[in-house]
């Protein structure tokens, strides 16, 4: 196995390891950087205007000189180590801690405003800027230029694309929002890296492939491509030979619980644990100290399978990744958190690595944030994780251990961790303390929200105005002021100040016009914003809704399609896409979209109704029956007017199509659906017994099926419901016409089918008597109101005809 692959997994099991690579693995990044000071010397940079092109050109020129001075694969490996040292040193100062003192290595760079402007300009992507106070941000620039922009220089380094992807993903993590350009570059690098990964052998035990798939899955997870993420995570599990399952076991959760009940638990076992079984240093794991809830589930003595061995660190990372996927692919409610907890508990059973254990504690803190008995530990644990970043004593892990699995977890940077702490404090009502955090971090939007919660809107506005005096043409601040004043002119100003490149300004303006029902302008604004950065799912959705309002269905279709590309589980987007495609007369595409929509909105009867109508139009009779059954289930208990639950028109069409053996959508005879249709009709009559049109419709079905006794029974049920309607005796001509029509249908059925033999017996042996009594009852009941009318006389004539 090449030395470069040892660097990928951050472990060294060789005795003759190159010096630069050994320094990487031991966390001595400053030594590597100090030995390469010539690479980072830019005497021509000082005093020149800020340009995103200047810095990479200068550094690439230095890189070429560095490689030409001693052309060899060893020289390329040394250059790779320099790039990795820049990347790890940046991560140390922004992710893992403790902060390093590298000021002597790069004199003046941190304080050079011109240099800082170039750095920010270089790292922004799709007009998404890096966090304003990112420490040692120039290290990430150096890392990107070496590991990504100079990829073609690494002719003998097979892992270069993997390091490029890692660097770009770190860059993405410090931007305000996801960047479409970066996403494509990262995925391209990961796909390229796949081609060069060697077959795993020896001590690696599949860890190399496991890490590759895991990192790829976390990238997909970050961009909310959850199905693709899950696929990669399963590949990672397979490569690592991790065996696990989410199951149940008897146990107690509270101190006063007498009997064992079923508890969710993750049973997991690594294939082989060759690494150290535990870390010498462990992040502070705060005790719950509750008078009722146990620290952890106390399983029953007979639950032998719960006693598990130590997991490899990479397997712990895989379990945490599956945990995040559970969170992303399920609704936000208590059951989801209950399902996530076992993954975290299994990971925290043994502390193999400082940062992996930190990630487990962070997820546990999030899960406990909304429970009254655990919320205190949740906040204190989060505070402890923030505090440990700057700790340098012997109780914390060395930098080398912290870096070992930093790419295998989605740990946020320190400022995002502090922001999370601030938001947690806001949720508890400790708004003033949260405000102090946000002001220190210069997270102005969060600070403004705190001022508004404190009912200090004036102070919020004064803060933004003061900041704008310092930086008059800062688009983000102008947009925030527009939010406070609700002034769309400020969004326009931000757009102009940014050189027509600030997507946030156009998103805000688009939202403003949407609220004002000016949908054409809303579409225009969102279009401009999404051309700059198309990864805003909600913006595409609102733009699609606005386009629908102005009948611009082509634009709406594009917008909702983009929503689905970003999040394939957005049921509302699938529904709206189907509606648009119906308007565009593309019913087959609409049918497929509705099929996806009902997967994610299974309880929404309106989507099922659209699915029903589209299925009938396309001849998808089986799906139409399924839709009618589902609508019946959903609406029966939730509507007062039970008569509207079944669409009689659709039921008539189904009956005609299936009984006439019309070809289905796939070209097969639809008579094969008769058993399912009969099951549907049975379900309908069980639940709806007071709606005459139902029985009239079903009588047609039995007539077409030549089941004549059932025809008469159905018509009798409809007749009895109508004959007892008080409206026919109070002069309601419409009600009289309905009952008269059904009566004549019933009499005709008696005459036509009464003497027929069905299953060896007459359909109705006394049909003449039944027909006469049916007519006499209606005639006598309506005589006082409708005697002399044409319809009443028609009933009398029919009775006379029967007598003769």
Image: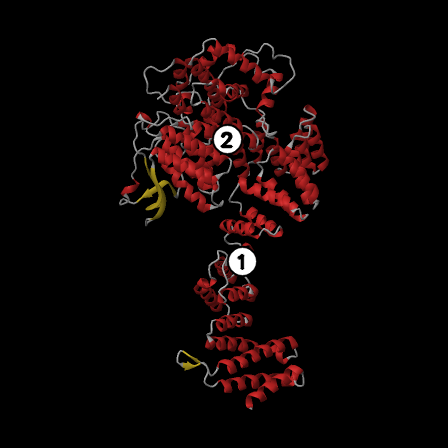
Q: Secondary structure at mark 2?
A: helix
Residue 767 locus on image (x, y percent): 49, 84
Q: CA distance from mark 2 to mark 1?
A: 48 Å
Between 636 and 397, the one lying in front of the other is 636
Give the residue displayed 58% in from the left and 20% down from the top.
119
Between 531 and 194, the one lying in front of the other is 194
Q: Secondary structure at mark 1?
A: helix
- In this view, the residue farthest toward the bottom is 804
- In this view, the residue farthest toward the right is 489
Mark 2 nearby-residue class (10 Å; few <14, some 14–19, many ≥20): some
Relative to 220, residue 690 above or below: below
Q: Which of marks 1 and 2 precedes in the sequence?
A: 2
Relative to 611, residue 214 above or below: above
**Residue of label 2:** 417
- Specify whether residue 56 is in view: yes
Q: Quadrant of the C terminus?
A: bottom right
Taking the image as shown, residue 109 lies to the left or right of residue 258, namely right
**Residue of label 1:** 612
Relative to 525, residue 750 above or below: below
Residue 184 locus on image (x, y percent): 53, 31
In contact (CB < 8 Å): disc 2 and disc 1: no
């Amino acid at each position: 196995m090449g030395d470069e692959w040892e660097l990928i997994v951050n472990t060294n099991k060789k005795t003759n390891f190159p010096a630069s690579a050994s320094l990487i693995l031991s966390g001595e990044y400053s030594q590597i950087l100090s030995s390469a000071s010539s690479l980072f010397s830019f005497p021509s940079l000082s005093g020149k205007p800020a340009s995103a092109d200047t810095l990479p050109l200068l550094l690439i020129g230095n890189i070429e000189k560095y490689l030409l001075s001693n052309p060899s694969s060893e020289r390329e490996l040394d250059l790779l180590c320099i790039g990795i040292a820049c990347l790890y040193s940046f991560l140390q100062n922004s992710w893992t801690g403790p902060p390093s003192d590298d000021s002597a290595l790069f004199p003046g760079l941190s304080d050079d405003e011109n240099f800082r402007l170039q750095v920010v300009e270089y790292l922004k992507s799709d007009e998404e800027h890096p966090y304003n106070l990112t420490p040692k941000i120039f290290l990430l620039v150096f890392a990107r230029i070496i590991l990504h922009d100079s990829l073609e220089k690494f002719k003998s380094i097979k892992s270069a694309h993997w390091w490029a992807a890692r660097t770009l993903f770190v860059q993405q993590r410090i931007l305000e929002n996801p960047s479409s350009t970066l996403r494509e570059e990262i995925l391209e690098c990961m796909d390229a890296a796949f081609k060069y990964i060697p077959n795993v052998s020896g001590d690696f035990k599949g860890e190399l492939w496991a890490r590759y798939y895991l990192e790829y899955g976390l990238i997909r997870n970050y961009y909310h491509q959850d199905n693709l993420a899950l696929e990669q995570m399963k590949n990672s599990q397979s490569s690592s030979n991790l065996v696990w399952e989410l199951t149940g076991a008897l146990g107690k959760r509270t101190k006063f619980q007498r009997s064992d009940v079923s508890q969710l638990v993750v049973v997991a076992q690594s294939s082989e644990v060759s690494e150290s079984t535990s870390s010498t240093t462990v992040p502070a794991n705060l005790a719950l100290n509750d008078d009722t809830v146990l620290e952890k589930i106390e399983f029953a003595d007979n639950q032998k399978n719960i006693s598990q061995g130590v997991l490899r660190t990479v397997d712990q990372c895989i379990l945490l990744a599956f945990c995040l996927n559970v969170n992303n692919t399920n609704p936000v409610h208590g059951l989801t958190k209950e399902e996530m907890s076992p993954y975290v508990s299994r990971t925290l059973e043994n502390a193999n690595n400082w940062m992996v254990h930190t990630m487990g504690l962070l997820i546990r803190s999030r899960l406990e944030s909304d429970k009254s008995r655990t919320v205190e530990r949740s906040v204190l644990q989060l505070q402890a994780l923030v505090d440990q970043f700057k700790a340098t004593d012997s109780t914390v892990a060395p930098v080398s251990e912290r870096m070992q699995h930093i790419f295998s977890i989605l740990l946020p940077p320190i400022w995002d961790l502090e922001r999370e702490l601030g938001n947690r404090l806001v949720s508890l009502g400790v708004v003033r303390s949260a405000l102090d955090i946000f002001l220190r971090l210069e997270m102005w939007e969060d600070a403004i929200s705190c001022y508004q919660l404190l009912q200090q809107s004036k102070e919020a506005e004064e803060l933004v105005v003061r900041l704008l005096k310092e930086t008059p043409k800062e688009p983000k601040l102008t947009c925030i002021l527009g939010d406070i004043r609700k002034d769309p002119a400020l969004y326009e100003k931000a757009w102009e100040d940014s050189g027509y490149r600030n997507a946030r300004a156009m998103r805000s303006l688009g939202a403003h016009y949407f609220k004002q029902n000016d949908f054409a302008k809303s579409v225009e604004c969102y279009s401009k914003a999404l051309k700059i950065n198309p990864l805003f799912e909600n913006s595409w959705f609102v733009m699609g809704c606005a386009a629908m309002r102005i009948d611009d269905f082509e634009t709406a279709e594009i917008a909702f399609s983009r929503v689905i590309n970003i999040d394939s589980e957005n049921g509302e987007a699938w529904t709206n896409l189907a509606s648009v495609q119906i308007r565009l007369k593309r019913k087959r595409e609409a049918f497929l979209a509705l099929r996806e929509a009902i997967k994610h909105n299974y309880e929404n009867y309106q989507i099922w109704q659209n699915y029903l109508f589209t299925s009938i139009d396309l001849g998808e009779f089986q799906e139409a029956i399924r839709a009618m059954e589902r609508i019946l289930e959903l609406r029966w208990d939730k509507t007062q007017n039970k008569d509207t639950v079944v669409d009689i028109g659709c039921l008539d069409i189904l009956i005609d199509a299936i009984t006439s053996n019309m070809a289905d959508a796939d070209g097969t005879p639809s008579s094969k659906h008769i058993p399912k249709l009969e099951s549907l009709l049975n379900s309908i009559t069980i639940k709806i017994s007071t709606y005459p049109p139902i029985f009239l419709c079903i009588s047609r079905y039995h007539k077409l099926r030549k089941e004549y006794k059932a025809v008469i029974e159905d018509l009798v049920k409809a007749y009895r419901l109508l004959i007892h309607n008080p409206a026919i005796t109070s002069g309601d001509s419409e009600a009289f016409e309905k009952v008269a029509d059904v009566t004549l249908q019933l009499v005709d059925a008696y005459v036509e089918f009464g003497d027929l033999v069905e299953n060896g017996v007459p359909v109705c042996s006394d049909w003449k008597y039944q027909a006469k009594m049916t007519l006499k009852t209606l005639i006598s009941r309506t005589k006082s109101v409708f005697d002399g009318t044409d319809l009443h006389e028609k009933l009398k004539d029919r009775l006379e005809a029967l007598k003769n």
